[in-house]
Image (cartoon, helix red, strand yellow):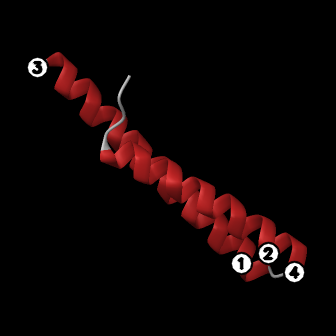
């Protein structure tokens, strides 16, 4: 299955969020941890938008 741009961008945001969260844990920076979680959540939403676009594209 080929992924669309939203799915790829969403996964990339999730990965960046994981890295940022891990960095925040290593440096004990609560703000970095929170920002990493937020970025990861945004990535999940964007990936879901891509999933919906793909399913709509297939149904047409």
Q: Which residue is situated farthest in the front direction here?
A: 2
Mark 4 or mark 1: which comes first in sequence?
A: 4
Q: Quadrant of residue 4?
A: top left
Labels 1 and 2 touching (C-beta < 8 A): yes
Against 54, residue 37 (above or below) is below
Q: Which residue is situated farthest in the left direction here?
A: 60
Which label was assigned to residue 24?
A: 2
Labels 4 and 1 touching (C-beta < 8 A): yes
CA separation, marks 4 and 3? 49 Å
Labels 2 and 3 touching (C-beta < 8 A): no
Mark 1 or mark 3: which comes first in sequence?
A: 1
Q: Dot 3 corresponds to which residue?
A: 60
Which label was assigned to residue 32?
A: 1
- What is the secondary structure assignment of the residue under circle 4? helix
Label 4 crowd (10 A; few <14 / some 14-19 / many >=20): few
Q: Dot 4 corresponds to which residue?
A: 27
Q: Nearer the viewer, residue 28 or 11?
A: 11
């Amino acid at each position: 299955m080929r992924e669309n741009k939203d799915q790829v961008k969403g996964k990339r945001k999730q990965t960046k969020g994981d890295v940022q969260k891990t960095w925040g844990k290593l440096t004990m920076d609560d703000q970095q941890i929170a920002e990493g979680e937020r970025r990861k959540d945004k990535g999940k939403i964007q990936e879901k938008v891509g999933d919906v676009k793909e399913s709509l594209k297939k149904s047409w």
